[in-house]
Image: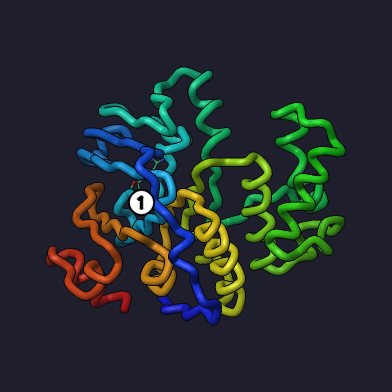
Amino acid sequence: MSEQATARTIDRSKMQVSDEVAIEISNMNKWFGSFHVLRDINLTVNQGERIVIAGPSGSGKSTLIRCLNALEEHQQGKITVDGTVLSNDLKNIDKIRREVGMVFQHFNLFPHLTILENLTLAPIWVRKTPKKEAEETAMHFLEKVKIPEQALKYPGQLSGGQQQRVAIARSLCMKPRIMLFDEPTSALDPEMIKEVLDTMIELAEEGMTMLVVTHEMGFARQVANRVIFMDAGQIVEQNEPEEFFNNPKSERTKLFLSQIL
Ligand code: ADP
Ligand code: MG
């Protein structure tokens, strides 16, 4: 676990939280078979919030964010994303996946496609965007993540940090309103973590609503407006970063922080 300090000056004044609700989870429960993995989750996220989700391995962090774009089903309670209730109706799922981008620990790029093809695949085939327009959008986002010169290479020719930035650009090509990150830097060598965090910081500065599962507590302090601590399927505690780190309330949070900081 690192306290990756970023050399950039972060402009938190650009990170405005609006009154508009982006995600609302009420009384949500989820089981895997008989295993009760998420317990009575209540969480409201407004547009523009940057939320870091922390907690020990197996506490349900991935499952929680996977429920938000219907990669996992929940059995009880209600999840509303950008005004759309997440039911098992395929139409709703499609709409929500369009608005919610997700970046995983492993980049999941198609190895036999170029970077540009990885970025245009879904826009062309799912969204029916004309190829030329999809390529222009892809190049725009490759420039944004600072690797336009890699467009015609294959994923295997890029470093891990570059591949993760491609994965972020690929999500952005779908113009999401919300981005979910599941340990986006955990598979990266230390020297590559910063370039991915910097990309995420820029997104935050542009007002993107973000939920980030990460052990990068430096990122949490600098970018998050709220840190959520999960343990054993529950949200145990949440607070603004300063309070969360300096004045944790529950014993479980204290123990967790003592282990990682
Ligand atoms: P975290 O991301 O906090 O490490 P996860 O959400 O991945 O935790 O997992 C929470 C718990 O649910 C763990 O005990 C894990 O073993 C279990 N789990 C995760 N996915 C499945 C699945 N598909 N089937 C059964 N159990 C699962
Ligand atoms: Mg996980």
Q: Which residue shows up at 71% across the image and 53% down it?
A: 141
| Camera-nearest residue between 156 and 16 | 16
Q: Residue 227's spot in the image, x, y percent?
A: 31, 60
Which residue is more in the foreground, 139 or 14? 14
Q: Position of residue 48 (x, y in %)?
A: 43, 50
Residue placed most toward the observer, 12 or 245: 12
| 8, above or below 241, in the image | below
Residue 81 placement: quadrant: top left
Residue holding disc 1: 61
In the visual, does 196 lie left or right of 81?
A: right
The image quarter containing residue 35 is: top left
Colour convention of the picture = rainbow
In the rendered structure, which amino acid carries the disc numbered 1? Lys
Q: Label 1 CB, ligand 1: below 8 Å?
A: yes
Q: Quadrant of the C terminus?
A: bottom left
Q: Which is nearer the eye, 189 or 135? A: 135
| Residue shown at 44% from the left, 33% from the top | 82
x, y percent for residue 103: 55, 51
**Quick one: quadrant of the N terminus?**
bottom left
Residue at screen point 41% across, 28% down: 83
